[in-house]
Amino acid sequence: MVDVDAEQWCLVVEKREAEQTRRRLLEEGLLDRRYKPRSEGDAVLLPVTEEIAGATRRTFVTVPQRADLPRHDLVGGIAILQEDDPEAAKRLLASRPSLHTVLFPETPVEGEYRTRRFAVLAGTPTTRTRVTEYGLRFDVDLAHAYFSARLSTERQRILGMMEEGERVLDMFAGVGPFAITLARRAELVVAADLNPAAIHLLIQNIALNRTGNVIPALADAAHLPRIGLAPFDRVVMNLPLAAPAFLPVAAALCREGGTIHLYALEEREGEYLPHIRAVTVGNVVERQVRTYSPGKWHAVYDIEKEG
């Protein structure tokens, strides 16, 4: 029995972009396969698992589940289960030809390098994979450097905000997804990270994508003002658990009228506005990117530096 009255979040895309967007959502684990995509005029409606940037509510027809698969996240050819269930991992691996490994996180993201320990539940015993995102490729090692495929839409949003020839600072670059994405429109991107393993992968990804305008920097973000860098047009702060503490540093490195993108975990709307107002009086736009855990949101503040 199908349900024609099920309402769900979705992305509305032009038909010529539908297949590329569907594949991207599938890779990121955001395509809700319980519902059948449908046309609406000249657009295609793609159901998604949660409220993401650009999502809207529409009615969909449900489709029969082909298999009882566990909830999981996808990062390239790796699936990450939220439960330590080897049998479910085997079913998942068998259901998706694109997968080579199923992992279970034994720890949360922790430490100054933002890493987790994983157990291999099925497939090839590795934490390394390659992620394809909007035509870019990123080699990732989940045990040695943090990576979130779910922020791909955010990276494209910021790219769309940029003017040609901007100078960009990525304060917590990881393996380079923001830095290399924004390099498509920037004159120069300085990509800093404290984690040597992340910088090693970043250098590989710069070469992999033939990106000639990204400068990797193994550095503590707190010390970046000492290097004597010229002010940047845009500063990205993707370190949700700790980024607000570095906001004065970001403001010191951003030119007047430039933009700072502060990512943070918050329990209430506007939680970090007082902290931001202690640094700048410029315009601030807050957006909730996705649900992080019950009662907690992954949010971004787009801050125009002024004063």
Image (cartoon, helix red, strand yellow):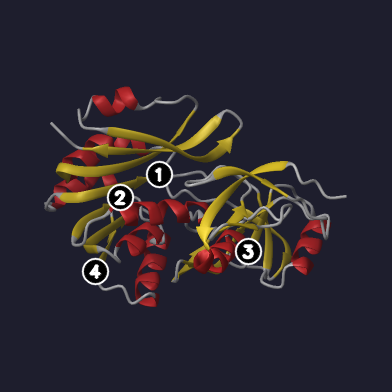
First of labels 3, 4 by sequence position: 3
**Circles 1, 2 touching at the beta carbon (< 8 Å):** yes
| Residue annotated with mark 3 | 78
Q: Amino acid at mark 1?
A: Leu
Tag nearer the camera, 4 or 2? 4
Q: Disc 4 on helix, strand or loop? A: loop
| Residue annotated with mark 1 | 239
Q: Residue at x 20, y 32 (%)?
A: 282
Q: Amino acid at mark 3?
A: Ile
Q: Quadrant of residue 276?
A: top left
User: Is 161 above or below relative to 125?
Assistant: above
| Residue annotated with mark 2 | 171
**Circles 4, 1 touching at the beta carbon (< 8 Å):** no
Q: Position of residue 125 (x, y in %)?
A: 67, 68
Q: Residue at x 80, y 63 (%)?
A: 90
First of labels 3, 1 by sequence position: 3
Q: Residue at x 63, y 47 (%)?
A: 49
Q: Position of residue 200 (x, y in %)?
A: 39, 67
**Circles 3, 4 touching at the beta carbon (< 8 Å):** no
The residue closer to the viewer here, 6 or 50, is 6
Q: Disc 1 on helix, strand or loop? A: loop
